[in-house]
Image (cartoon, helix red, strand yellow):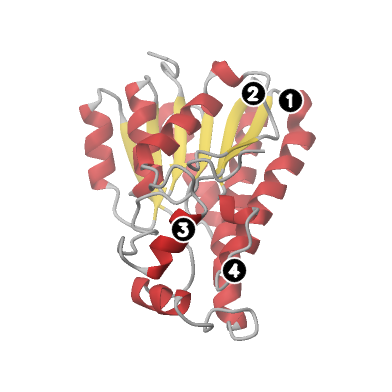
Amino acid sequence: MAGALRDRVAVITGGAGGIGRATAVRFAEEGADIVIGDLAPGDETVALVEKAGRRAHYVRTDTTSEADCDALVAAAVAEFGRVDVGVASAGISSAATAAERQARVESDAGHVVNVSTDAFRRVMDVNVIGVLQTDRALARQMLAQGDGGSIINIASTAGKIPLAGASPYCVSKAGVWMLTKVMALELATTGIRVNAVGPGYTTTPMWDVPEDSPAHRQAMSITPMGRNGTPDEQAAACLFLASAESSFMTGQILHPAGGQFTD
């Protein structure tokens, strides 16, 4: 797919690391200029995009702020003149630290009957409201341009597989998947395509549990290929959905997930 995004402009939230960073680099390798929105510093991603021969711009963005999402897209237009592709990759697995998440997997502390409403709400705010506000800002700009575009939401297999102790994450990712389908239907006649990538367990800062841990063993028990995915593998799925290779696809979800769904 060499040059699949030549001279396109892509906005990527969560682009400072993980799947977002890998997607930014892959898109740049395929010819796109990149605008990175993240709360974390984006210097490293900017450098990687520029190393790939394309331009990059970082905007500090809290996707739970509608004003920040609108400002991110406005900055992309000011910097590069338009927006062709958007990837809503910003997300969190829980409001807990990595150590707290591991402890909750090994107990019932994260079960619905015990999880705090504030913790549940925080995940929903980032993973659902943040994606909504990102997608809306992208779609409004694409509608104004009048020549279509591609919006890609990062969901998860957890949106379809209930995981004990992870109710906020599972529910939020199911929400992302339904939001994707509704927006795809609403925008189908405009040339704006809305699809999702639903990763399985992927080696990122979000999934940082030791291989000898109960959490990792449980994850591999439902992953037939028996390994974690990589951010680059998720980025490849995003590239397909961003490119003309998927021009007749909208309202769909791809699962680079090591065989978690084989039906």
Q: Position of residue 251 (x, y in %)?
A: 70, 35
N-term mark: 2 or 4: 2
- In space, the residues marked 1 and 3 are separated at their CA atoms by 40 Å
Q: Residues within 10 Å of mark 4 (few under 14, many from 20)?
A: many
For the residues labelled 1 and 2, say whether their Cβ atoms are less than 8 Å apart. Answer: yes
Q: Please, is residue 55 above or below residue 137 in the view?
A: above
N-term mark: 1 or 2: 2
Residue 168 circle label: 4
Q: Residues within 10 Å of mark 1 (few under 14, many from 20)?
A: some
Amino acid found under the numbered disc labelled 3: Ala
Give the quarter of the figure containing the C terminus: top right
Residue 148 circle label: 2
Residue 219 circle label: 3
Q: Nearer the viewer, residue 45 or 154?
A: 154
- In space, the residues marked 2 and 3 are separated at their CA atoms by 38 Å
Q: Nearer the viewer, residue 18 or 258?
A: 258
- In space, the residues marked 1 and 2 are separated at their CA atoms by 6 Å
For the residues labelled 2 and 4, say whether their Cβ atoms are less than 8 Å apart. Answer: no
Q: Nearer the viewer, mark 3 or mark 4?
A: 3
- In space, the residues marked 2 and 4 are separated at their CA atoms by 33 Å
Amino acid found under the numbered disc labelled 4: Pro
Q: Position of residue 224 (x, y in %)?
A: 49, 45
Amino acid found under the numbered disc labelled 1: Thr
Q: Nearer the viewer, mark 2 or mark 4?
A: 4
Identify residue for label 1: 190
Q: Please, is residue 163 above or below residue 31 in the view?
A: below
Taking the spot 46% from the left edge, 37% from the top edge, the residue there is 11
Residue 65 visible in the displayed image: no
Secondary structure under the numbered disc 3 in the rendered image: helix
